[in-house]
């Protein structure tokens, strides 16, 4: 069984979303396909099972959170 999820995250501005994506895209590998639409980050996540998808979502959102905090400090 394949499990998929789409995440849409709105940011304050385009520069911020670009810097966040740049910071996290190295970890995307084959599990996450992310792109920017204006000031929105859209990520399509795919895993082999629901439990694996939940683990990937948790990791991805943690990375986005840390990247956003770092971008805010700069």
Image: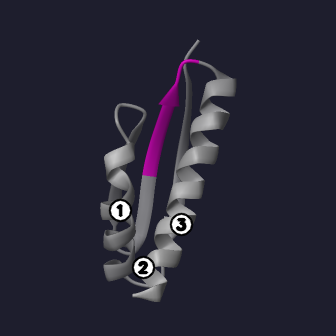
Q: CA distance from mark 2 to mark 3?
A: 9 Å
Label 1 close to label 2 by CB (< 8 Å): yes
Above or below 48: residue 35: below
Give the label on residue 42, or none. Answer: none
Residue appearing at x 64%, y 46% in the figure: 58
Q: Residues within 10 Å of mark 3 (few under 14, many from 20)?
A: some
Q: Residue at x 33, y 55 (%)?
A: 35
Q: Is residue 23 above or below residue 34?
A: below
Q: Give the dominant element type of the magenta stretch: helix, strand or loop.
A: strand
Give the Cα separation between the discs numbered 3 and 1. Answer: 9 Å
Q: Dot 2 lies on which element?
A: helix
Q: Quadrant of residue 16?
A: bottom left
Contact check, label 2 and label 3, Cβ < 8 Å: no
Is residue 60 one of those drawn in magenta?
no
Mark 1, secondary structure of its residue: helix
Q: Is residue 73 left or right of residue 61?
A: left
Q: Residue at x 53, y 49 (%)?
A: 60
Q: How is the rendered protein coloured? A: one colour
Residue position marked by numbered label 1 in the rendering: 23
Q: Earlier in the sequence, mark 1 or mark 2?
A: 1
Q: Residue 26: where, in percent of width, then height?
A: 32, 48
Label number found at residue 66: 3
**Between marks 1 and 2, how big is the CA–CA gap?**
9 Å
Q: Is residue 41 above or below residue 16?
A: above
Residue that mark 2 sits on: 71
Marks 3 and 1 close (CB-CB < 8 Å): no
Give how far across and how far down residue 15 sits, in percent. 31, 81
Q: Earlier in the sequence, mark 3 or mark 1?
A: 1
Residue 44 painted magenta: yes
- Range drawn in magenta: 43-48
């Amino acid at each position: 069984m394949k499990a998929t999820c789409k995440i849409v995250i709105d940011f304050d501005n385009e520069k911020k979303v670009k810097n966040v994506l740049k910071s996290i895209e190295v970890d995307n590998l084959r599990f996450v396909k992310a792109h920017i639409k204006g000031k929105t980050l859209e990520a399509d996540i795919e895993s082999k099972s629901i439990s694996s998808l939940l683990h990937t979502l948790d990791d991805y959102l943690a990375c986005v959170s840390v990247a956003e905090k770092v971008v805010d400090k700069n």
